Amino acid sequence: MTEQPIIRFENVTKQYDDDPPILDNVSFEMEKGKFYTLLGPSGCGKTTILRLISGLIEATSGKIYFKDKLINHVPANKRQVNTVFQDYALFPHLNVYENVAFGLRIRKMKNDEIDKKVREALRFVNLVGFENREIKEMSGGQRQRVAIARAIVNEPEVLLLDEPLSALDLKLRTEMQYELRELQQRLGITFVFVTHDQEEALAMSDEIFVINEGKIQQKGTPRDIYDEPINRFVANFIGESNIIKGKMIRDFLVEFDGKQFECVDQGFSPNEPVEVVIRPEDLEITTPDRGKLNVKVDTVLFRGVHYELCSYDENGNEWIIHSTKKAEIGAEIGLYFEPEAIHVMRFGETEEEFDARLESYDSYGDKDAD
Ligand SMILES: Nc1ncnc2c1ncn2[C@@H]1O[C@H](COP(=O)(O)OP(=O)(O)OP(=O)(O)O)[C@@H](O)[C@H]1O
């Protein structure tokens, strides 16, 4: 049996005044000890989810559980949750040690206990020896670590991180990604990490929730989300994609670009209009007589590990190809792809609608059986 979730949202909606909801009937579960990422464009509702978990705001409707306890009305300071903010919110007039000790002093903990906990937290984030430094003497990455130490010193069961890497330059950001992931594994607590950077989400997470316009579009492991995007939004947001309109002829046969292709998808109505995704790295360059599709190369960019080719088919559809093979601009080439490389999606379907559809098939099946 799986463990009970540490956080559970049940049909949670957040709305200000009569405006459209910022979070619209959102449900999910988070398990203990996993790294979760909330991924989505600016304004989609990521920070709102964090604020609801930490208790800074209350849900308009729906239920929020911490373990099996309903916490909708539990004040923020009574929740076993801490937040690392984007700007770190450190106290500039206190040194590193006192920044980390601050929350414990407020709780009137004894000095020797505070000392033990602060030193342990600093050890966790590799800042031993920096105790007496002023905050202004610390680099961006070091400030980040102070902010994390200040959060973990309270031994929270859940750590919320609101775009904590966005202020750092690319190199430091990559280093901190490794550090954070490693820290989460050592601490064994649940991290809920907010970002709008899809590569960061893919690299760090056990599970990603892709959010758009107040709804969770898809939940899953980075591989699931990358390999099996549920709709155009997810396919576009996660990595580069070729997305083309088509029609599902029947199970395992899809039509696009005026041709029919074998695929691995099923469960659509006959001739249902669909969208088809093929990742650029799943397209192989071959000769026109061997290609499943033929295209003309328009531009070629060298990207370090591969070439990125932009090409067009005879119907004017654009095809992006990532390949270690180079092709000449203006050349006619064939594109080969396996049936598994084709991902068929319903128009604009979210995961909840997808699940509901699968259930409705099951109930049809039951009726047939009667
Ligand atoms: N107190 C409030 N009153 C009215 N609208 C609000 C309030 N707080 C947030 N919003 C709106 O809620 C929406 C979602 O905000 P949220 O901060 O959750 O987005 P986000 O996904 O975290 O975005 P970003 O990546 O830009 O931080 C935004 O349109 C925002 O303007």
Image (cartoon, rainbow, N blue to C red):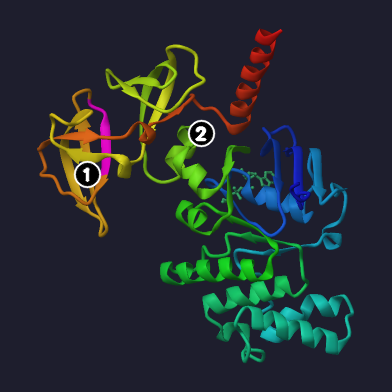
Q: Quadrant of the C terminus?
A: top right
Give the residue drawn at x 87%, y 53%. Answer: 74
Give the residue drawn at x 71%, y 52%. Answer: 31
**Residue type at the position of mark 2:** Ile
- The residue tagged 2 is 230
Up-down relation of residue 318 to residue 175 (above or below): above
Could you say where residue 342 lies in the image, as x and y percent from the top left?
Answer: 37, 32
Instruction: Please name the predominant secondary structure of the magenta segment in the image.
Output: strand
**Residue type at the position of mark 1:** Leu
Q: Left or right: 236 with respect to 10?
A: left
Q: Nearer the viewer, residue 220 or 15?
A: 220
Q: Determine crowd level at label 2: few under 14, some 14-19, many 20+ residues with C-alpha closer than 10 A.
A: many
Q: Nearer the viewer, residue 78 or 4?
A: 4
Cβ of mark 2 under 8 Å from ligand 1: the answer is: no
Could you say where residue 341 lies in the image, as x and y percent from the top left?
Answer: 36, 36
Up-down relation of residue 6 to residue 287 (above or below): below
